[in-house]
Every structure is written in C-alpha cells, then in structure tokens.
Image (cartoon, rainbow, N blue to C red):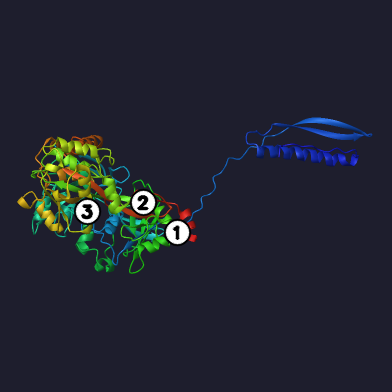
C-alpha cells in the first residue's frame, strides 16, 4: 500500500474539532508509516497541516507549516548475549582403564592427547600452519656452529592444581610455582635414561650424552649430568647437540619432552600414575597446560584460567566418556552425546547420508612405498626405476583397496609435515607414455628382455592383493608378463631382515614397506629414510649430490628456505629426471565423525589433539541434543 491520505470533509461545526484531531493524527501516522516502509526516506523536519473551519455555512481552509523538533534516535544497543552454560567438548575413549599420561612413558593416542592439553612444551606444533611456535620458550638462539641452542623461558606458566569452586561453577587454578628450566632438564634426563623406559628416546640421541645414558644398563647420576641440557637459571635453558639440526625445534614440541615437577616424581616415584597417586592425599596432581583435571579419574578437564598463551578456541570444559563393553563411542556419537569419534575401526556405511555429511578424513603420517634394490641387475638403472614407478596408477590402487580411505602419493614427504610440499605438486606420478618411453631408453629397451625378478611383500591378504594389482599394471602398461614378476610373501620380520643392506642373496629386487613418522619434519623422511649415510639406506643407494642437499636443508633455520630446498629435493628424486630411489604409493586416511556444532578445529595429524583450538557452537549443540 502506498503512503496516501485522503481525509473526508464535514459541513458540521460540531465536527471541526474531531476533523482537526483526525487530520493531525493521520499526518503523523502517515509520516511514521512512510519511514517504516521506505528505508531511504529521512524523517521530515516539518509538516504541512490544512485545517477546515465552517463559518456561517462557508468552509474556510487554513494551511499552516508546523516545525518538528527532531527526536534523536537512540543508538542501537547490542542484545545481551544469553549465557547457555559452559562451552563443553565431549569426547570418548574406548578403553577399560585410564590412559597413561606420564609424558616420558605414554605411547597410546588417548594418553598423548591428554598430555598435549595438560602439560606445556618448550615449543608447540601448529597443526593448521605446519609451523613450530613458542610455548614455554618465548625465544631461542642458535650458535654459529648450529650445535648450541639457548632458550629463554616465560615466567608466567605455572604448575597448578584445582582450587576452590567459584560462584560461576568453575574452579580456580591454584598456582604452586612457575615451570622452570630445571623442570625441562629433569624431563630430558628422564627420557634419555632407560629407567623408566621412553619408547621414542632414540629421537633425542642428537642431544649430547643422551645415547650413552640410554644405552648404559645402569646409568649413573654422572651419566645423566653429562647429557647436554643445562639450566643456566630459572628461565634460561641450554642444549648441546652432536650436530646441527634445524628440526630440533620440532623435537622440543613432542609429548615425551614435556617437563615434569621433580618433587612430584620424588614423592611418588616413576610409577606415579598408579593407585598410590590416586589415594595419596599429600601428593597433589600438578599440571601446566591449557587445561587441568578435576580429580584423578580423568573424566573432566577444565580450562586453566592462568594459562597466558592465546586460545584459538572457546572450549571451557572437556567431558571424557570411557566406553566399556557393548556401549561404544560410536553409539554415544549416534546419540549426540559425543562431539566427534574415531571411525577407523567401525564397520559402517560411510556413504549413508548422515555419516557422509559428518565424515572427515585425517591423513596418517605413514607412507606406503615400493623399495628398489640398487644392487639388482634390473633396477640399478634410473630409467627402469622411473618406468616401473610411472606405470602405477595410484588413484586406481587406493580406490580398489581402500575406497576413499587413502590418498595416492607421487612424492615422499606427506601433508602435515614441516617443510612439506602440497600433495601431487611435485613428482611424476602415473604417466604410462612416460613410463614406456623411459623403459625404451633403458639398457633393456623394453620389458621383454628383463629377466624374472622377485617382488617381496608381507604375508597379509591386503599385501598380496596390492602386489597383484601392481603387477597387472606393469603387465598392461609396460608389456611385461606375469611369469617375469615373481611375488613372494614372507612374514614381516623376514621382510625386514631380507631388505637390510647386508642381507646378501636374500635381498629381493623390489619390495613393499612403509615408513611411519617419528616427528613431523621433512628430515624424518629425507634424512632418516633416504640419506645414503644418515639412514639405514636399505636400497644401498650410492651417495650423490642429493645427499648433500639433504644435509644442507637440515642446517637451514629459515622455514621458507628449508621448504624450498626440500621441494627441490623431491623433484630431483621423484621428478621426470629423478633418481627414483623408491616408489611412494599412498597414505591411509583416518575417518573421523564430527558433529555439526563443532564449527572449527584442526585435527592433529601427528601428536596430540589441541582442544584449546576447538570452537563449539553451544546453541546448535543444545538444539540438536534436544531433538
């Protein structure tokens, strides 16, 4: 309806007052109606009013201009945010007992997840950016020879325990004392010692004296004191390494390097996480991370209000459900009681609509590959290695074996690793024409003249199926025959033994293996798996310029420079003129089911989940749960 007014007329003197009032009222309403319905019309500063009077039977119209006093529009006020209660993250563990949360002893993923959130590290691995960030250490310096690292620590991160309950229902954090450099020294010495046993302590052998202490059956106090880690004062820490290592910052982010308070361990011993800890009222459970536990049953974690580092998420409470017996974490997720659940071992239909729309694939840090024997009379030629690598259709391989639960790889360093390149941006990958061209350029000229060779794999049905698929691709793309490619299945231990450099005649021509990361840095792949001297070098590959580049990359502290060198290495090894020391095949994906109210989170591809980076929309969560 348009903004139109059509007042009626009256010839009755009695109607004059009413007509005047109605006319004025309609004019006011007209102005208000126009403002409400037309957003681009400003409020008028004046209005024109026509008043009609009847005098001795004659109508007289009097027009007046009435100035309006502007009424200031009050500024819009934000609606008060309704507090829906604490922001909670609900997770589940499929286990009968509490996870081990001793940083130097835990090996299970549940325990590593909790350690990540309960104990501060010197540095922290950012899963979103694949970079190392400061944590307890706010800065560091490296000596000119790359072997001495000096860390400056914060003085505002505390060992805390739950305090009194506050009016808002949360518990105060009672600070006991700051986390100091001496606490880090204690943890590193504890990890390097073989009592208690730290499974991944070998990654710390780069610290001077660590290997000696770890391999000595009964390391003395003197052995431990000779380990290259020293507290210069409460906030200054010094490490001495056996060689330059740019990846050392990555090691300082790992769970088994997290500091512990020595007085706590002194009171309860190395087996502190036991019934005596849970029943000893004099031994308070101390933590130093972004969350702390409310009680010893590890069922509820609360945000640490004294945590000084920025939080990317909004989680205030973490509820942990321990699924036992028939009640699985998947059942709880289906009932909307859990925010997310690991679906790797679930026998469910991932194409079902509700499942498919909530499914996320997290890449694993294990690359499955084919290794070449450089002593073989067949695979000593790079052209032959390139041909057999380029004839493998990784996409077809993973779709046949795993459907959507794997990702083909044409270079070695996987995603989620410091200094890695994006998947499939380097390397040749599947290229049948290139494969045939390379084989034609080899000394064999084609597959017909290649003598029979051994393709050795483990004893599992999956390994056999994979080997048969690859053999069929070599037959179809390169013109080989089935009789030429002899698949041998052996026990995994035998496969490892047969592929050692000193295995002699037992060494196969080509084999199936996988490499699992020990720390999320490119050196763990290039240096620890491929280098001609710094790795096992199962391929017995002669040293080349590429090995010099690997060491050069490991001495660079600038992240961009390191990434550029590793990208160059990947091209020189897996590009169209690459050495092709092995054939990267794929990485497996871990399926995860995530509820819609988890609006932001970056899954951990290595190490523990960082719950302080998760964003939960409690309005959606409460609404979904009420259905």
Residue 569 percent across, percent down from the top left: 19, 37
Q: Is residue 569 visible to the viewer in this orientation of the structure?
A: no
Residue with the mark numbered 1: 167
Front one among 283 and 392 = 392
> The N terminus appears in which quarter of the rendering?
top right
Q: Secondary structure at mark 1?
A: loop
Residue 459 percent across, percent down from the top left: 17, 59
Label 3 neighbourhood size at 10 Å, few (<14), some (14-19), many (20+)?
A: many
Do the numbered discs 1 and 2 sit on residues whose CB atoms are within 8 Å?
no
Do the numbered discs 1 and 3 sit on residues whose CB atoms are within 8 Å?
no
Residue with the mark numbered 2: 360
Residue 303 percent across, percent down from the top left: 37, 54
Q: How far is mark 1 from mark 2, CA to CA?
A: 39 Å
Front one among 104 and 378 = 378
Q: Secondary structure at mark 3?
A: helix
Q: How far is mark 3 from mark 2, CA to CA?
A: 28 Å
Q: Which mark's residue is nearer the viewer, 3 or 2?
A: 2
């Amino acid at each position: 309806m348009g903004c139109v007014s059509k007042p009626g007329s009256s010839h009755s003197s009695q109607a004059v007052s009413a007509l005047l009032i109605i006319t004025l009222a309609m004019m006011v309403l007209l102005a208000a109606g126009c403002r409400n319905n037309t957003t681009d019309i400003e409020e008028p500063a004046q209005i024109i009013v026509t008043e009609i009077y009847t005098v001795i039977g004659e109508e007289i119209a009097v027009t007046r201009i009435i100035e309006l006093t502007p009424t200031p529009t009050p500024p819009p006020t934000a609606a008060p945010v309704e507090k829906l209660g604490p922001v909670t993250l609900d997770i589940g563990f499929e286990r009968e007992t509490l996870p081990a949360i001793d940083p130097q002893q835990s090996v299970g993923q549940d325990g590593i997840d909790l350690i990540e959130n309960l104990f501060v590290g010197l540095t922290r691995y950012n899963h979103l950016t694949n970079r190392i960030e400061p944590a307890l250490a706010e800065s560091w310096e490296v000596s000119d020879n790359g072997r001495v690292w000096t860390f400056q620590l914060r003085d505002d991160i505390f060992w805390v325990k739950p305090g009194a309950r506050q009016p808002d229902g949360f518990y105060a954090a009672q600070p006991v004392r700051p986390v100091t450099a001496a606490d880090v020294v204690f943890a590193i010495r504890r990890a390097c010692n073989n009592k208690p046993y730290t499974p991944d302590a070998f990654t710390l052998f780069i610290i001077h004296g660590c290997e000696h202490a770890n391999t000595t059956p009964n390391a003395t106090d003197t052995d431990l004191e000779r380990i290259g880690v020293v507290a210069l004062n409460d906030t200054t820490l010094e490490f001495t390494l056996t060689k330059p290592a740019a990846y050392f910052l990555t090691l300082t982010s790992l769970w088994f390097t997290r500091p512990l308070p020595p007085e706590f361990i002194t009171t309860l011993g190395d087996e502190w996480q036991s019934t005596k800890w849970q029943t000893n009222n004099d031994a308070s459970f101390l933590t130093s991370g972004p969350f702390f536990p409310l009680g010893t049953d590890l069922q509820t974690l609360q945000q640490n209000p004294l945590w000084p580092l920025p939080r990317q998420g909004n989680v205030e409470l973490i509820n942990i459900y321990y699924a036992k017996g028939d009640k699985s974490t998947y059942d709880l997720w289906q009932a909307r009681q859990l925010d997310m659940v690991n679906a790797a071992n679930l026998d469910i239909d991932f194409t079902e609509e509700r499942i498919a729309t909530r499914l996320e694939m997290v890449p694993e840090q294990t690359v499955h590959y084919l290794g070449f024997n450089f002593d073989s009379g067949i695979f000593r030629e790079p052209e032959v290695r390139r041909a057999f690598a380029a004839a493998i259709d990784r996409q077809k391989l993973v779709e046949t074996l795993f459907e959507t639960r794997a990702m083909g790889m044409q270079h070695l360093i996987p995603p989620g690793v410091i200094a890695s390149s994006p998947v499939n941006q380097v390397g040749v990958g599947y290229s049948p024409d290139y494969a045939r061209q390379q084989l034609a350029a080899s000394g064999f000229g084609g597959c017909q003249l290649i003598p029979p060779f051994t393709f050795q794999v483990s004893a599992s049905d999956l390994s056999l199926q994979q080997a048969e698929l690859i053999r069929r691709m070599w037959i179809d793309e390169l013109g080989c025959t089935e009789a030429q490619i002899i698949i041998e299945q052996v026990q995994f231990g035998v496969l490892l033994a047969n592929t050692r450099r000193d295995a002699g005649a037992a060494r196969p021509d080509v084999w199936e293996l996988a490499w699992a990361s020990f720390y999320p840095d490119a050196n763990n792949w290039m240096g620890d798996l491929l280098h001609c001297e710094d790795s096992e070098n199962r391929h017995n590959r002669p040293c080349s310029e590429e090995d010099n580049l690997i060491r050069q990359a490991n001495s660079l502290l600038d992240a961009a420079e390191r990434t550029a060198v590793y990208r160059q290495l990947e091209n020189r090894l897996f590009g169209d003129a690459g050495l092709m020391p092995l054939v990267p095949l794929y990485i497996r994906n871990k399926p995860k089911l995530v509820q819609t109210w988890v609006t932001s989170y970056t899954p951990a591809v290595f190490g523990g989940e960082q719950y302080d980076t998760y964003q939960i929309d409690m309005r959606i969560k409460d609404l979904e749960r009420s259905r």
